Amino acid sequence: MIWIAVDAMGGDFAPRLVVDGAIAATRNPDLGVALVGRADLVEAEVARHGDADRTRVRIVDAPDVVTMEESPSAALRRKSGASIRVAADMVATGDAAALFSAGHTGATVMAAHAAFGMLPGVDRPALAATIPRPQRPAILLDVGASVECRPPHLVQFAVMGGVYARVAFGIEAPRVGLLSIGEEATKGNELTREAHRLLKASTLSFIGNVEARDVYSGKADVIVCDGFTGNVALKTLEGAAAFAAAQLRAAIGGSRAARVGALLQRRGLRELAERMDPDSYGGAALLGLEANIVIAHGAAKARSITAACTLAASLASGEITEKIRARLGPARGGHFLRRP
């Protein structure tokens, strides 16, 4: 049984939709959830699920919540009973194999760092988001965990992203691209130019720079950048996808002929929607810490929560933390650089 410590109070729709999604995840007979939050509120939501298997659904009381408006460092110092802190401590003590939260990202990163610490050879954590594509997903990292980075950090992100691509999606030889403002090695700022040089000198399958318009193209399986750039890119992609979907719906409903055409193509449209739906991937894996952690958007609904809990369990069963540790090692990642 793989137990997931779920921050039941994290997210815009907590605890209701978090509980709904987490309990749905327990349909997997090998997965259990520990719902961490205000026990009375969480119990009331669990009670709505009369068919829930209570042998695989635990409630762990945590009286405090870190809100989106609070400074995460100040809140975590002041609130020893914060749900995210209690959930992280459960993983640290071995009472759960992975951590999930849709709450304050900064608080989740800080609580996880305090509870677990960094993996040897990793200087900065990275959030790895899944980018849905028609052929197979791509990994974009970092999308918000480490806003300020140095070139070696991006190389570490590339290594961790490669391990994640293999464990989560079975991509045996992931191609690595560096997000920049042009394909030429001389394009970009000092960070990207030096990161390009280091990546090119590595044993990774580095294909060079990729522009934002190429994220969906299939050129690269792992796309690396600093957390500020990645967060802006991810939210731009999400907004563009939502706009395109809205325009498609409007076009389909614009005339009787369009509706008839959509009806004839409904199977293909449904399959495309399922492949491109970000909710089917759940959340972003927080890589580089001594634990398995998945973070979802604050607006995540139940379906996304279910997928995120399933992802957390798959990362634990796939031993991604151990594989990143083996790949980077105590030499701070130097062993995958080509020797002169």
Image (spheres, rainbow, N blue to C red):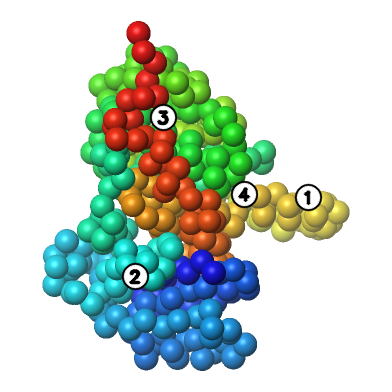
Which structural element holds mark 1?
Answer: helix
The residue positioned 26% from the left and 61% from the top of the image is 115
Q: Is residue 16 above or below residue 195?
A: below
In the rendered structure, which amino acid carries the disc numbered 4? Met
Which label's residue is closer to the chain start, 4 or 3? 3
In the rendered structure, which amino acid carries the disc numbered 3? Leu
* Residue 288 figure quarter: top left
- Asked if residue 129 shows in the view, the reply is no
In the rendered structure, which amino acid carries the disc numbered 1? Gly
Q: Nearer the viewer, mark 3 or mark 1?
A: 3
Q: Which residue is mark 2?
A: 90
The quadrant the C terminus occupies is top left
The residue positioned 33% from the left and 83% from the top of the image is 61
Q: Are there few (<14), some (14-19), or many (20+) residues within 10 Å of tag 2?
A: many
The image's mark for residue 179 is: 3
Q: 103 left or right of 301?
A: left
Which label's residue is closer to the chain start, 1 or 2? 2
